[in-house]
Amino acid sequence: MPRKIIIGLILSLSVLWALLGATMHLVYSETLPRAPEQSTGRTYRLVVNHGSVRYGTERDVRVQKVLEDGLFVAVFVSFAAILFGLGTGVLHFRGNTPA
């Protein structure tokens, strides 16, 4: 598989992960209650969308943790892919043609 396609896939998946995380924050901010609801099981405190406190289920907490913890990995992998692409000549700065 060509390097350019691999780098493009890695960068696309990283952007997709970031968009998914942002979407999750917006959805939780709009749909989850501001106070605990014992009847629905939404008793776990979540901080979403720049400090808004909402209450969700244990599953909501796990989803948020996975997306937030995975964001660091996605950013690290995307930077590694960019550095790899620049180092191998697959990617280059505008105005600089690859050797």
Image: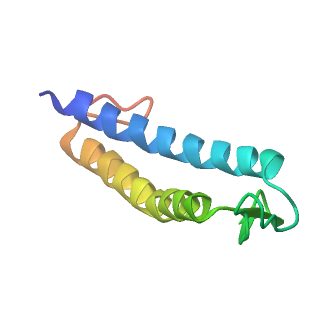
Res 90 → quadrant: top left
Which is more toward the observer, 64 or 2?
Answer: 64
Report whether residue 27 is seen: yes
Q: Position of residue 22 (x, y in %)?
A: 65, 47
Left or right of 21? Residue 40 is right
Residue shown at 19% from the left, 42% from the top: 88
Q: Residue furthest right?
A: 34
Q: Residue furthest front?
A: 39
Which is more toward the observer, 56 or 90?
Answer: 56
Left or right of 34? Residue 87 is left
Q: Position of residue 28 (x, y in %)?
A: 73, 50
Res 20 → quadrant: top right
Q: Position of residue 82 (x, y in %)?
A: 35, 46
Which is more toward the observer, 99 or 69?
Answer: 69
Report whether residue 99 is seen: no
Q: Position of residue 78 (x, y in %)?
A: 38, 49
Which is more toward the observer, 84 or 65?
Answer: 65
Left or right of 15? Residue 79 is left
**Residue 70, relative to residue 94: is it above or below?**
below
Name the image quarter holding the N terminus.
top left
- Tally the numbered discs: 0
Residue shown at 58% from the left, 41% from the top: 19
Residue shown at 78% from the left, 67% from the top: 38
Picture colour scheme: rainbow
Residue shown at 74% from the left, 46% from the top: 26
Name the image quarter holding the C terminus.
top left
